Each structure stands twice: as structure tokens, then as C-alpha cells.
Image: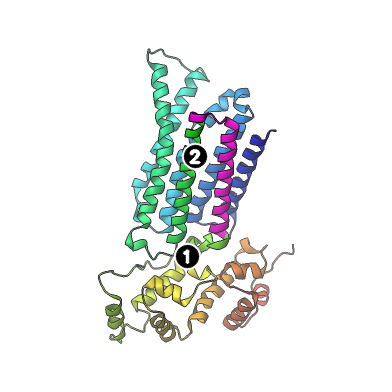
């Protein structure tokens, strides 16, 4: 096995492992994260196909070549875009118009299946004076299409994030970086292809550079997405549906007027009907922002577009708890849910506590004991039998 083949199989294996971990792990599994998993798996499939081609597998078994000819790269921007839309709860994610995104891929499937049925499987044949010219033109159009399609989706995604209503969304910063990385990756692929055609740098050099850049991209997604930003923030389908409350504040009102209105209305300012408290509950129950161990009162106040002191008043008056205790109560509920879920039986209690958003073992055990009157191990023993590993 040469160096190029080694790079290809390593890149493919790495992607399959990371993609499947996100897809099946109870810590990361969610409808939103599934799309990110599919994105990584598609990249891995592309690397695997190139590896099989480099090992001459499709020469030895030509009837499988259709799997190589189909441009799976058309699915890469589709799954990324659906992950993107679902992360910010965009209306397009629920619209049937999203199915139009699959048209380029379906075009590639039909084109390559028809071509292989005639030229490889010999199911039929027909003569046409300009047939080869037409095939050449269509395949060139397909090649141009998958580069431009990927770039258009990345640019479109970034443009959506620039809209004012998403400026304070908790996932915006991460998604902007993801869009930029994908745009850079596709642009890099295009540049390498152009350089090869102009200077003929060679297949092995091109593939080695592309594999390396792709591996770096996958590692960045896994490290930054999972370990830094907690991809599990979108696991709303595992914690139950909550009332849909609009997150963003009407931009036509100034901050001072909104706060003055709340403070001068005793019937709603400090009850559960308070608009900012509802938005805060929405952030906690729907977006699970408590899973961020670095979450602070200032961060949430900025999301709600109110002052930190005003947020403190709301939380104290309505919940009769200070901000830290209030946030930790959500983390404790999450820990209890995970302990009672058999999918988490093989994980240590400390791992579960950190995943729920606690920053240290001490804070985790202290908060849990204060909230439940039991230690985490006592709660687990009392509520279920855990098999020994």
C-alpha cells in the first residue's frame, strides 16, 4: 500500500468513526446532530471511493463502478445545510421546498446509472452521431455543478446568519465558523484541481493534499463542535417538547422602553408570564444552554438583550433562587434524566455531570445533594440497578 492509499484509508476511517459516534452515542444523538453526522459520513464515503479507485477495485469489479461515478459530493452541502437550518430553527427546515436540494444528486444518480447500464452492464445500446459529445458535455456540467453547488450553499448559509434576527442566536458563532471552513475547503479543492490542470502536479500530490485538508476539517468539526461547543445542546428531541416561545425581541422597541414597561407593570413583571422569563425558559428547555459549563448571567442577558441586573431581578423574584442555583437546578434535572436512561449506564456519574454542564466534580455533587437530598450515587442506587462492568 503506497502513501496515497494509506492517507485515503486513514481519512475515510477517521470520518466513519467520528460520524458514527455522533450518530449512535447517547451523548450526541439528536435529529439536529444526525445531519452533521451524515455530512461527515459523506466526506468519508468520498475518501473511501477514491481509495477503492486507487487500489483498482473498480477495474477488477467494473460493475461496482457506478457507486464511484455517482457524485455523492452533491449530498455533502444538502446535509450540512439541513443541519444548519435545524440548528437555528429556520422556517425552511420545515418546508417541503427543502427537498429541491436533492435534485442535483438525483440528476447525478440518473445520469450515471443510465451511462453504466449501457457501457458497463450492456443492458442496451443505441447509436447517435453526437452521443459521446453529449455525454462529455453533460459530465463536464456535472463536474462544474458539484463545485458551484457546494459554494452556493456555504455562501447562502452565511448570508442567512448575517440576518439581524439570528445575530444573538447561541449557535450563530459556531455556524459562521463552520460555513467559513466549508467554503475554504471547497475553494481549496477547486484551486488544487486548477493547479493540477495548469501545471500537471500529479495525481498523488493532489490526492495527498486533499486528504490532509479533509482530515483537518473533520478533526476541527469534532474538536470544536463536540468538545468546545457541546453538540449535545440540540438534543431537544430527547428531553421532551416545550411550548414554542419566540426567542428574539422586537427590534422596534428600545431597551430602555422595554425594561421600563416591564418594571411599571406589576401584574406581569415578576411572574412566570414575564416575557423575558419565558424567553429564558425557552433557551434552557429548548436549546439546553445550561450544558455550556461557561454559561454566565452576562451571556444570557446579552442573548435576551436586557441588562444583567434586570435578569437577576427576574430570576430572583420568580424562582426565589439566585442565578447560579437556578441554572444548576436544570443541570441536576438533566443528570437525573440521564441516570434513569439505560443508555447512560456505562458512563460514570462524573462524566454525566460534566456533560450536563457542571464545571467541576465539587459543584456537581454539592448542587445535586442540595437539590435532591441525595448524592448522585445514592440516587442511582435508589432508582435503578446498574450492571457491573
Vertical arrangement, residue 278 with respect to residue 20, above or below: below
* Colour treatment of the image: rainbow
**Image quadrant where residue 351 sits:** bottom right
Vertical arrangement, residue 226 with respect to residue 340, above or below: above
- 357 on left or right of 178: right
Vertical arrangement, residue 268 with respect to residue 285, above or below: below
Rendered-image quadrant of the N terminus: top right
Residue at 28 percent of width and 83 percent of height: 260
Classify 10 Å Cα crowding around label 1: few (below 14), some (14-19), many (20 and above). few
| Residue at the limit of the structure toward the right, as seen here | 389
- 196 on left or right of 381: left
- Can the viewer see residue 266? yes
Check residue 198 for magenta coloring. Answer: yes
Q: Which residue is mark 1?
A: 240
- 126 on left or right of 200: left
| Residue at the limit of the structure toward the left, as seen here | 252
Give residue 57's position: percent from left, percent from top.
62, 28
Question: Of the residues under marks 2 and 1, which one precedes in the sequence?
Answer: 2
Rendered-image quadrant of the C terminus: bottom right
Classify 10 Å Cα crowding around label 2: few (below 14), some (14-19), many (20 and above). some
Give residue 151's position: percent from left, percent from top.
41, 43
What is the secondary structure assignment of the residue under circle 1? loop
Residue at 27 percent of width and 75 percent of height: 254
Q: Which mark is residue 189?
A: 2
Q: Main secondary structure of the magenta part?
A: helix
Q: Are marks 2 and 1 in contact (CB under 8 Å)?
A: no
Residue at 65 percent of width and 35 percent of height: 5
Give residue 244's position: percent from left, percent from top.
37, 66
Give residue 296's position: percent from left, percent from top.
49, 75
Give the extent of the magenta segment.
Answer: 197-226
Q: Which mark is residue 332?
A: none
Amino acid at each position: 500500500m503506497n502513501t496515497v492509499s494509506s492517507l485515503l484509508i486513514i481519512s475515510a476511517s477517521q470520518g466513519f468513526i467520528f460520524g458514527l459516534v455522533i450518530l449512535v452515542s447517547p451523548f450526541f444523538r439528536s435529529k439536529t446532530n444526525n445531519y452533521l453526522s451524515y455530512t461527515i459520513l459523506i466526506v468519508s464515503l468520498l475518501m473511501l471511493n477514491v481509495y477503492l479507485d486507487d487500489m483498482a477495485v473498480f477495474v477488477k469489479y467494473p460493475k461496482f463502478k457506478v457507486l464511484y461515478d455517482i457524485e455523492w459530493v452533491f449530498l455533502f452541502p444538502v446535509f450540512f445545510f439541513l443541519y444548519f437550518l435545524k440548528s437555528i430553527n429556520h422556517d425552511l427546515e420545515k418546508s417541503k421546498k427543502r427537498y429541491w436540494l436533492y435534485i442535483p444528486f438525483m440528476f447525478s444518480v440518473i445520469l450515471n446509472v443510465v451511462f453504466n447500464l449501457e457501457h458497463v452492464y450492456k443492458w442496451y445500446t443505441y447509436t447517435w452521431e453526437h452521443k459521446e459529445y453529449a455525454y462529455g458535455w453533460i459530465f463536464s456540467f456535472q463536474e462544474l455543478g458539484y463545485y458551484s453547488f457546494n459554494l452556493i450553499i456555504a455562501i447562502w448559509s452565511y448570508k442567512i446568519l448575517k440576518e439581524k434576527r439570528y445575530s444573538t442566536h447561541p449557535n450563530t458563532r459556531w455556524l459562521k465558523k463552520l460555513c467559513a471552513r466549508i467554503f475554504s475547503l471547497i475553494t481549496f479543492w477547486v484551486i488544487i484541481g486548477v493547479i493540477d490542470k495548469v501545471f500537471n502536479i500529479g495525481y498523488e500530490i493532489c490526492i495527498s493534499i486533499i486528504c490532509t485538508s479533509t482530515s483537518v476539517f473533520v478533526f476541527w468539526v469534532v474538536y470544536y463542535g463536540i468538545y468546545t461547543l457541546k453538540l449535545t445542546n440540540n438534543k431537544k428531541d430527547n428531553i421532551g417538547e416545550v411550548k414554542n416561545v419566540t426567542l428574539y425581541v422586537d427590534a422596534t422597541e428600545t431597551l430602555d422602553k422595554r425594561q421600563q414597561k416591564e418594571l411599571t407593570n406589576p401584574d406581569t413583571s415578576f411572574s412566570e408570564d414575564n416575557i423575558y422569563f419565558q424567553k429564558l425558559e425557552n433557551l434552557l428547555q429548548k436549546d439546553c444552554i445550561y450544558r455550556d459549563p461557561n454559561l454566565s448571567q452576562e451571556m444570557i442577558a446579552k442573548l435576551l438583550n436586557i441588562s444583567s441586573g434586570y435578569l437577576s431581578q427576574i430570576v430572583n423574584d420568580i424562582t426565589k433562587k439566585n442565578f447560579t442555583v437556578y441554572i444548576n437546578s436544570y443541570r441536576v434535572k438533566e443528570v437525573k434524566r440521564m441516570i434513569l436512561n439505560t443508555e447512560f449506564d456505562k458512563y460514570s456519574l462524573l462524566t454525566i455531570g460534566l456533560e450536563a454542564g457542571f464545571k467541576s466534580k465539587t459543584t456537581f455533587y454539592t448542587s445535586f445533594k442540595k437539590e435532591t437530598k441525595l448524592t448522585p450515587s445514592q440516587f442511582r442506587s435508589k432508582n435503578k440497578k446498574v450492571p457491573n462492568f
